[in-house]
Image (cartoon, rainbow, N blue to C red):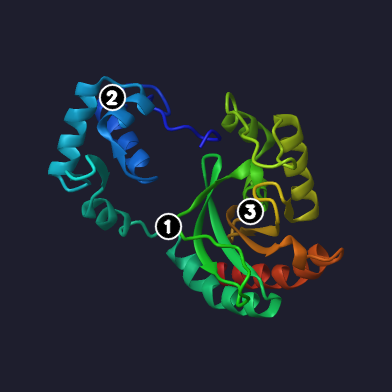
Amino acid sequence: MKSEPVTAEPAGSGPNVVKSADRALVILELLSRGRHRLSDIAETLRLPLSSVHGLLGTLVHRGFAEFDPTTRTYGLGLKAWTVGQGYTGHRDIVGLALPLMDRLARETGETVQLSRLDGVENVYIAIAESPQPMKLVSAVGMRLPAHADGLGKALLSGLSQEELVRRYQGVELERFTENTVCELPELLAEVQEARVRGYAVDDEEYIVGCRCVAMPVRDHSGEVVAALSVSAPTPRCGPDWTEQTREPLSKVVATIEQQLRR
């Protein structure tokens, strides 16, 4: 994904960055997006084939990666899943939000998604599916470029303009549809608008035929810790859809925030 390319270079510099460990972690990040051949991994990360082979051997040995001799591809191993289960950073908010999300999905008839920001991507951490046959298809763990959808812009609204510029320094804003924001000044303006009005929208910016309204979720300190959205196929979105959807969405967000403060 061009919005946040996988790179073998450390995110920061300094004496505490161990090059081999950094490279192994970047390989795991790449494998989290699908299975790859050894040569593809080396080419994508621009690393020597021998180095990647050795790192993969270590990851396979420790159970963090697995090798399929039939397809000659590498993928994540069971140990990666086990370690991932130890992360509890969003479990409290998911537990609080899911019952309310299910109710909101029934009330609006549309898909409800909860997401957190990771770099310049938003990651789905909980989903309540629309009860209707035609609906948005997504999955927990799925990553989308924050500049191209409502959830992402709602999450970005929790950052300062300075931090936004820093994160997007040198990042290409990939175009997905005719409506995608592809210039940083335009993105900064849209995020500022989302800050002022308290919600962000996606008008077929990532997928043609899909619209979304999203709101940031804040903790007791006022920090944006997640964002909640309602997404619907464009044919079901009338001229007042955003306003009609924002009202029940804001009530659910307010309830989640109230519970987070307890």
Give the x, y percent position of residue 210: 69, 57
Residue 14's quadrant in the figure? Answer: top left
- Label 1 packing within 10 angstroms: few (<14), some (14-19), many (20+): few
Establish if 59 lies above or below 245.
above
Give the number of callouts: 3
Tag of residue 151: 3
Foreground of the two, 192 or 131: 131
Image coordinates for residue 35, horizontal then vertical, percent: 32, 44
Residue 262 in view here: no
For this rendering, which residue is in front, 197 or 67?
A: 67
How far is mark 3 from mark 2, CA to CA?
Answer: 34 Å
- Between circles 2 and 1, the one closer to the viewer is 2
The residue tagged 1 is 89
Q: Which residue is at a point 63% across and 69% down the rendered structure image?
A: 134
Amino acid type of the residue tagged 2 in the rendering: Lys
Q: Residue at x 22, y 39 (%)?
A: 72
The image shows residue 172, relative to residue 94, as above or below, that is above
Which amino acid, mark 3? Leu
Numbered disc 3: secondary structure: helix
Mark carried by residue 19: 2
- Rendered location of residue 223, percent (x, y): 60, 52
Specify the quadrant of the image occupied by residue 58.
top left
Q: Closer to us: mark 1 or mark 3? A: 3
Q: Tell me which residue sits at (69%, 51%) in the image.
A: 208
Q: Secondary structure at mark 1?
A: loop
